[in-house]
Image (spheres, grey):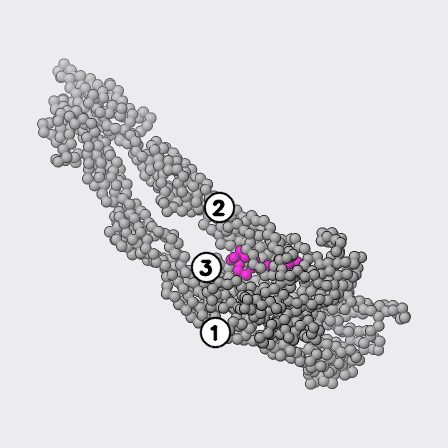
Amino acid sequence: MMAQDVYATYYDNGQYQPIVNNIFGEVSYRLADDEPNDIIMINKHTGLITYINPGDVTIVAEDTSTVYQSSSDTFTVHIEQATNSDLHADYQAISTLSTKKSKLSVNGQRGKLTFSVAPESQHLLTIDSMTGEMEPLGEEGYAEVIIHDEGNRRYLPASTRVNISIKAVKPGELKFANIETPFTKKLVIQPQKISDSNEGTLHYALASQDKNSKVLNINPTTGVMDVLKDGTVTIHVTQTFDKGYDTKVRNHYFIVEVKKGTRPKLEVDNANFTYEANKVLPVITRNAMAEPHYSVVSRNGVLEIDRNTGQPKIVGVGTETIKALDYKDNRFAQSETTFEYTINPGQHPGLTQDKLEYVYSEDKLEATKTLKLAGQQGRLSITTSNANVVAVKDRAIVLQHAGHAVLSVTDDGGNLYHAFSKDVPVTVLPAPHPQMTVTDINAVYANNLCIPVSQLNAKNVKGSLVIKTDGDESVVKFDKQKSCFSVLKAGSANFTVTSSGNGDYKASNPVSFSVAISPADSRISIDGRINEVYRPGKVTIQPPKVIDSKGKLSYAIASSASQKDVVSVDAESGVMTILNAGSTLIKVTDAGTGSYKPSFTTYSVRINQAPNPLTVDYPLKAYEKGDVIAPVVKDAHTKVTYKIKSYNTVVSLVDGATGKLAIKSAGDYDVEVAAVSNRNYQGKYFKVSGKVSKAPHPGIKSQIDNLYYQPEMEVNLNLPAPLGKRSYNVSSKAGAYRSEYLKIENPNVATVKVMNYSPIVDIDPLIVNITEEESVNHFALTLPNQSGKRVRVLPPQPKTADRDIELPPTFSIIDSNLNNKIDFKNLEETQVRFAGAIQLPSEDPQSKSIRLLVVMKPVNLSIKEAIKQGKQASVTLKVKRYEGCATSVNILNLPSLKPVDMTEGKVCSENEATNRYLTYTVADLENLEKFDEDEWETVAPFVSYYYSQRPFIPGHKGGDYEPENSNVIRKTVNVASWDRMTLKVTK
């Protein structure tokens, strides 16, 4: 095997699928010995790499196979620091006479910020290099401020520039600058007031022509705007004065233009995979603003786009070029890229054919068999252990003789799989003996007459003849030594003859014949003999011509005839009526005339068994396990039996006498039908082919699954067993925000990860779309035919979290459950994540805090009543995170500390415990003021939790991270601690 080195650039939650060639078995991955474990995580089974930090590590890949020698290779993963393309500050306007220091709002901060004024603008503005607070120097104009971000371990230093408009205003005038900015996610804009007028109170709202706009939401008191999309709106500012002013109200307007956002180019890495039929492949994108649309560019028959998930699906082997188009989030300019996925041949699933069985045939065309083995994927190469039984010719086998042989078969795997070899025993059974025919013998008595066997004119003889007397031996006796019929007197005798068969044929069924001896002195003789085939329905036969008759002829069954119920005979005309198959003797008497004495002679009548007219057909049926197929039988005049081969996987025989079959699976099948012979009909052996067609997919019936939220828990969907290969994705019809509640990491597995839930009690279920590939027994299940699995994500129940906490109504400090918990002492970097609340960035990005919107209802109303009366409103919480060594970060000194980012915690590097705290401040109750009720509570609890990207193993010695090269299965956690939070407030 050969693995390619990985050179990548870090990005948050970044992943990469390494390219490994020449895989012949199962591949496992691990970190090489003594490599750092904080650079990447690697899935030991799939090889998927998840970025943690920039750096270098060596990976060992090992390929083990039951067919091929094991192989291994090492490759290096080098992750560069990322470029901070998110660093951005909004355009700002200030008054020339402003005495209030304005502060720049910076987005995308990664490290420590420093601020400076560009040299050409230093006559217009001064700025605090550490805080970013600006002070105009009294002159109107446009200044340029330079912002430098020192970066951190993950991001390189970066700089950006922002224009500051310094405008002159009239004394006492209230004025706002228009705002123009590109869209970014979680963009927050402050109103740009450029005057020092502080008279009256200000109320902010969308102008009447834009009141239904979805571009932004605006806080009516502060004017802070949460931007939702690109577009242009006008903001109406109402200035209301107190009684001492002669003007009561003034109106002001400014324009906010949010342009389409810019972003780094969409990127997707090339990747290698091993062939697995119809497997849906993950696509790891960077800088995607929504789920991209994928299309196959090269059309090499390697990949197609799965109709359910919209992602590439394996259909062949080779390299395919895919185009990814990110256009669904129209707040950004669309972006597209192409990437290559290479599909290598998979490990052969194996030849499942355990044996072969044929019946010998002399017909060369019928004796030539083209092999198609169960599990075969490509062309076969065949050798034989016994060419006298089975010969090999041009990739086919030719049956030579009955017997046993072993075929050594190699399947080259076709285009999709590696080769596979297996020995398959083959048995060639002796064929049923062909229907043998003989003729009756008529002769005139003579002394010492012995009639040779050759006069039987036996046809289709396979082996030697075995002749047995059937009854009296006083007329004719078979001389086995001389191989002739020794004549003793006039009359008739009945015999049976059997062909013994040989190695290639079974023994024949016995065939009856007669030997008729006429008297020597008889004047009359018979021209010919009677040899007919049995036919039902009183069929008549004309008598043979009588030679040298002189008088009146009469006919009768000879007294010496052993079978008197073969025909009936008209005494005068000699016309015979067929009664049964068999052999009898007719006596013809010539009454003579005056010149001739009476005389008589005899002749034999042979009525042969008729070919068996039996027909059997099996009707076409659609698959239904256990259903019974009854044959359509016609002209069954003898007993019929049925048989199927033991290795038949399509049907089983319910009753060998009736031929009823039980359905096991869809497919083609053969039934061996045997009709036994009786007196009038020959036996018959033949094969009947039938087919069980695939059934329409019955659909998937399932109840709604109620999932009570726990952070990032993985849940197996409660589904019936699949009929074919399934794929899954979360339907986006429910709305983008709701589809984020569930995450499917592997579209081929019925497992969902619960990521979030609604801050209101949302009982509408999410839909997990399910499709199934065509299976052995059923046609494919596609989306128009079913609605998918319904899943309802509900708030967490009490006592399921580590703690249930009710926040105080104004301010609280939450001591992390991890503090002083010995099992997690060695836990390093974590992220603080939230669920069940709407998360917004801080109005001041440098503060590192975030805002949570939680939905409240009056305490005295049920959720249902609150919804009915429209009494629900949001309250804003400001949340800050503090972390560090216990000696320097504690409850007593939190007010003097700077908070840390929610996504990048701090860990005490000394041999000391790490303290972790969150503070919650109830910041805004304004939305509750319009209601009469005073006591309010959260509609649903919300959740905060500490998340470790690297799986952690808690332990009494402080715990540790899972070693990448360990084969020991340990219980690991990513969610280290979580709290279920509620809030009650009083207006």
Residue located 30% across and 33% down the image = 677
Identified by mark 2, the residue type is Ala
**Residue 511: x %, y % from top left:** 24, 33
**Residue 331: x %, y % from top left:** 65, 66
**Residue 175: x %, y % from top left:** 80, 73
Taking 431 as reference, is 31 above or below it?
below
Q: Is residue 753 magenta?
A: yes
- Does residue 547 appear in the picture of this structure? no
Write down the residue under mark 3. 276
Kindly report the secondary structure that dominates the magenta region of the rendered protein: loop
Write down the residue under mark 2. 695
Taking 698 as reference, is 173 above or below it?
below
Residue located 34% across and 58% down the image = 421
Q: Are marks 1 and 2 in contact (CB under 8 Å)?
A: no
Q: Nearer the viewer, mark 2 or mark 3?
A: 3
Write down the residue under mark 1. 34
Q: Secondary structure at mark 3?
A: loop
